[in-house]
Amino acid sequence: MIQSLAHRRPPITLRNRDAERLGQLAEVAAQRHPATADFLAGEVARAKVAPDSAPLPGVVCMDSELTFRDDSTGKEKHVTLVYPPEADVEAGRISVLTPIGAALIGLSVGQSITFETPSGERRSLTVLSVSEPN
């Protein structure tokens, strides 16, 4: 089971359309990817939901380009957060239906999240920069 460690869960914000679509995605994926779907559903449930027209500078939204740091290794990655059909790891397009994608959604620049992967590994990620989707 993927778990966000409660004492490390920063507040997150999602646009209304993303919250609705991500909630539906989590439901559909529950049988095939139960741990990640459950984690994603929990993140959607705890998010502050903003109107679709609200500017969310510095917040990781769907189709945002972002740079994050894996706090265990210190390595930085530049990626675009996408829905599963658009995912292409080699092109830096990571799915929101992965443990890392689900952890990053809704975070703001400077925020960190610690979570446990399905294999029991503890990971911590910090968002360094975000470009709003076009």
Image: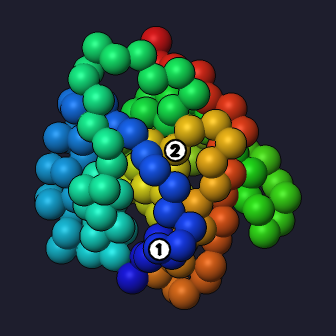
User: Label for residue 6?
Assistant: 1
Which residue is at a point 22% across and 32% down the rendered structure image? 16
Q: Residues within 10 Å of mark 1 (few under 14, many from 20)?
A: few
**Amino acid type for the residue under numbered disc 1:** Ala
Q: Is disc 1 in contact with disc 2, using a CB cutoff of under 8 Å?
A: no
> In the depicted view, which residue is nearer to us: 129 or 49?
49
| Neighbourhood count class around disc 2 (C-alpha, 10 Å): few under 14, some 14–19, many 20 upward | many
Instruction: Give residue 72's quadrant in the image.
Output: bottom right
Is there any visible trace of residue 67 in the rendered image? no
- Residue 127: give x, y in percent of width and height: 66, 44
- Most extreme residue toward the bottom is 120
Residue, x 27% and y 37% (percent of image)?
49
- Residue 114 position within the rendered picture, expressed as x and y whole percent measured from the top left: 59, 68
Q: Which mark is residue 48?
A: none
Q: Which residue is mark 2?
A: 107
For residue 114, side relative to residue 110 (left or right): left
Q: Considering only vertical position in the picture, is 112 above or below 48?
A: below
